[in-house]
Image (tube, helix red, strand yellow):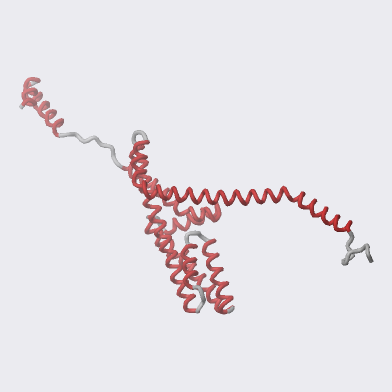
Amino acid sequence: MGGRPPLNIGDDQITGAFDTGVERIQDSAGSMVTAVVTGVGTVVNGVVTAVLALFLMFFFLKDGPRFLPWLSRQLPGSLAVHVPAVAARGWNRLGAFVRSQAFVGLIDAVFIGIGLWILGVPLVLPLAVLTFVSAFVPIVGALFAGLVAVLIALVSNGLVDALIVLAIIVVVQQLEGNVFQPMIQGRGLGLHAAVILLAVTLGGSLAGIVGSLLAVPAAALIAVVWNYLREQLGEPETEPETEGETEPEAGREAGLEAGGPSAGAAAVVS
């Protein structure tokens, strides 16, 4: 009895298990260090990006009106006029896009929030806010907000109310995508509803979700540049003649017809 421990585990087994654990830790040390470094790098990049975004937002809000005059002073020739003009129009158009997208998100949040409130689903206000914020992210945002609302309805109210919530979200999203968004964005951006639908479809097919997100602003900026070029190319280039230049010419011609060069000079003098 004296040579065996209570669990019948010998010293050689304990030593072998310890050596195996040490070997596994040594083998995975490289991947562990890599994972830690990657995680730390991601966190640092996120913090640096957030700080940089805050600084840029501060300077844009503080010195934004001075940017276009500064840009005009840096550009040569006619570019000092055309580039700031196009930039100002593009900025106004992007502002109209953000306002219209916010209005569409507000419509979604109100209708879906009313439906959730009627069904007695909890957390109506947070779900409405989530729906509003997700409206700025096409496709994925609506799917995420709808999934959260359906899951909360399923857990709290049961399967029937969850299916009703799903039907409400589908109807509201269809109305938003096919009616409200093209109409509101078309008026705010100066684009036809069909152009917006085609832009979203093309952007999604070319670049996925990011393309769908950037398709409408890109189409609006292209329309701004095209309209400006059309305005500039459509203006006729004429050199108006002043009265001081036409009257002496007429007097000179009349004098030459009446009595030669001396009469023409007298007519000009008079």
Q: Horizontal placement of 31 versus 189: left or right?
A: right
| Residue under the image location 93 percent in, 62 percent down | 3
Image height of 250 relative to 202, above or below: above
Image height of 46 relative to 257, above or below: below
Residue 106 location in percent, x, y? 42, 66
The one nearer the camera, 68 or 86, is: 68
| Residue under the image location 19 percent in, 34 percent down | 241
Q: Residue furthest front?
A: 2
| Residue under the image location 39 percent in, 46 percent down | 226
Residue 238 location in percent, x, y? 25, 36
Image height of 211 relative to 254, above or below: below
Q: Quarter holding the N terminus?
A: bottom right
Number of numbered discs visible in the structure rendering: 0
| Residue under the image location 53 percent in, 71 percent down | 149
Q: Quarter holding the C terminus?
A: top left
The one nearer the camera, 27 or 161, is: 27
The one nearer the camera, 139 or 158, is: 158
Residue 73 location in percent, x, y? 34, 36
Q: Quadrant of residue 208?
A: bottom right
Residue 265 location in percent, x, y? 8, 22
The one nearer the camera, 38 or 155, is: 38
Q: Horizontal placement of 103 versus 173: left or right?
A: left
Image height of 205 relative to 127, above or below: above
Q: Quadrant of residue 264?
A: top left
